[in-house]
Amino acid sequence: MDALLPWANIATPLAWGGALVFLRVMACLTMMPDIGDRTVSMRVRVMLGLVLTVALDAGLGVVAVAPPEHTLMMLPVVAREIVLGAALGLAVRLIYAAIQVGGDIAGINMGLSLDVLFNAASGEQQLALGRLFGVIATLFFFALGGHLIVTATLFEHLRAFPVGDGAFALPSTEVIAEVGVHMMRSAVLLAAPVLAVTLILNMAMGFIMRVVPSINIFGVGLSILMIGGFVAMSLEGEAVRLFIEHELDALPERMFELSGVLPGGP
């Protein structure tokens, strides 16, 4: 037994360091869209987290952290890793949120507010057009290498914020407000072509009703709005791609900002 003590003294810091890296990675994956949704089983998420943890841990040179002497002292260390990982995943989720809200705004103005689907991933009801925009965002995210950007940013974040370090900083209120405003502004800009077309069509139908009151404009109004909205949507596919491309370029900085630190230093 005495011969095993030196090995235990070496293995314990390595195991504790790897566990902390795993906690941050899992918190990030759980907070991210698609991967963190209910439709993805916990077993798949844990396996993906383990693979990323092994790769990141090896890239960092095998993280070794001395475990706290008392169990209660582990709680703030564990909570820190969970909060940091959740902040990283939140930055990715905000990109999806902007696109889905833009789809919801477009759907409401096209008269599709009654076309509601139950989203099993979030457990909430969602407009079908917003869900469609979310699927398109997922395709663009992986096609443009968003998963590689998230992995690289996780690695840089672990170097800037080593696991087991007591230093911790929350994002400022200005950063949180700016992120929220940016999300809503992006959603409105994505829905702007549909908003413009439906506004013009509504004004035209209102003018027709005033000129020819006998026409039942409500019988064809919804169809006109839907056709006009889908035509406008067909012309903004490139805009969605450019938006996601721009957001992916700014994603590392935003992930660090939501963690309370800018790239390059605390």
Image (cartoon, grey):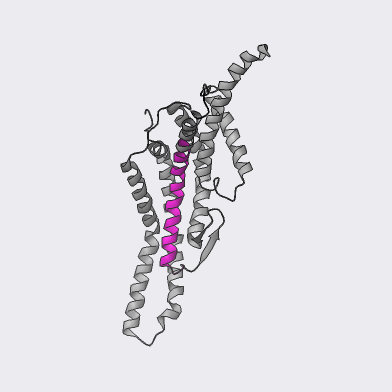
Q: Pick the quarter of the image with the C terminus.
A: top left
**Residue 102 visible in image:** yes
At a point 33% along the width and 42% down the height, the residue shown is 175
Frontmost residue, 116 versus 195: 116
- Most distant residue in the bottom direction: 214
Above or below residue 63? Residue 1 is above
- Most distant residue in the right direction: 1
Q: Pick the quarter of the image with the N terminus.
A: top right
Frontmost residue, 72 versus 114: 72
Residue 262 lies in quadrant: top left
Give the residues drawn in magenta, as a range. 84-112
At a point 50% along the width and 67% down the height, the residue shown is 115
Residue 63 appears left or right of 188: right
Q: Main secondary structure of the magenta part?
A: helix
- Most distant residue in the top direction: 3
Residue 244, percent across and down?
44, 47
At a point 44% along the width and 69% down the height, the residue shown is 111
